[in-house]
Image (cartoon, helix red, strand yellow):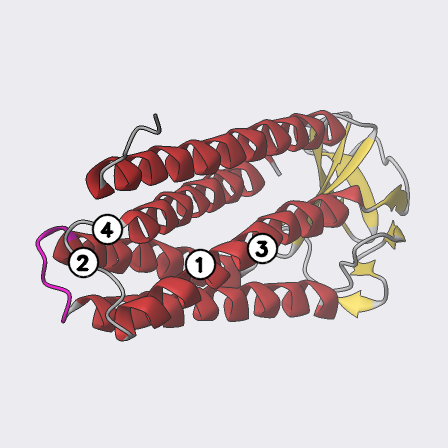
Amino acid sequence: MRSSISKEERLEIKKKTNKNMIYLAIGSMIMLFLGLSSGYYIAKTGPVWVSINVPEEFFISTGIIILSSITFFIALRFAKKGKFQLLPVFMIITLILGLLFVKFQRDGWKYMKSKGMYLSDAVKIDGLINNKDVEYGVDYTVFMNDNELKYVDGVFYDKRDEYNSIPLYPSVGADNVASSWMYMLTGLHLVHLLGGIISLIVVTIKSLLKKYNENDIVGIQVSSIYWHFLDFLWLSLLLLLYFVG
């Protein structure tokens, strides 16, 4: 005989299955970004490293994604309390903030490009990067064998060389792998975030159509878990780029 499964049991199975799937996806992403972060750290210890200051736009986007996590948390709280009339309001706000995050990420890349920092390029550091007017120590810094260099009158010196007695080179040629890493790390995060944006759209539409009830908010919970992880992941990447780069 076929055993009957109650509606509550089906919902519980659905909840566990969906959560396990998102946790598996998150675990895979953690492994991916841990590997890339290790590669980034190792690359910095190479012979020459052009350290790029994190664009201001990335800090603005950080504030935005943190705020979006807060509004999503509030939305989920209302759903758990059965206050579904307020759910669409906070989901729409969360979605708008998510799109604003994407906008400022794009602005950050545009700023990097305006400073001559491209995805992959061999550059010659001589006060200019790809003939773009940038300020040494403000827009970028050069490291040699993990030691910071100073730039004085067109010549690089070891920062520990107090009297500038040993010039290194009039210019330093290097592959600007720092910009490549920054584009790759932030770009991969954005690719995964677009999946989060799609989930926000789905949850927002369903909330507007009143598809959720007190017994079934699994979709909101799973989307919330993923979005909060993306927030945490971005904060981790920003700290890596700021303190290691």
Which tag, 4 or 3, sits closer to the chain's start? 3
Which tag, 2 or 1, sits closer to the chain's start? 1
Task: Relative to 131, say whether 179 is above or below.
Answer: above
Question: Mark 3: few, some, or many residues within 10 Å (few <14, many ≥20)?
Answer: some
Task: State the residue position of label 4.
Answer: 216
C-beta proximity under 8 Å, tags 2 and 4: yes
Question: Mark 4: few, some, or many residues within 10 Å (few <14, many ≥20)?
Answer: some
Instruction: Residue 2 in the image: state x and y as whole percent.
Output: 35, 29
Q: Amino acid at mark 4?
A: Asp
Task: Give the extent of the magenta segment.
Answer: 80-85
Q: Element type at marker 4?
A: loop
Which tag, 3 or 2, sits closer to the chain's start? 3
Task: State the residue position of label 1.
Answer: 199
Q: Residue at x 48, y 39 (%)?
A: 239
Q: Which mark is on residue 190?
A: 3
Q: Residue at x 54, y 31 (%)?
A: 30
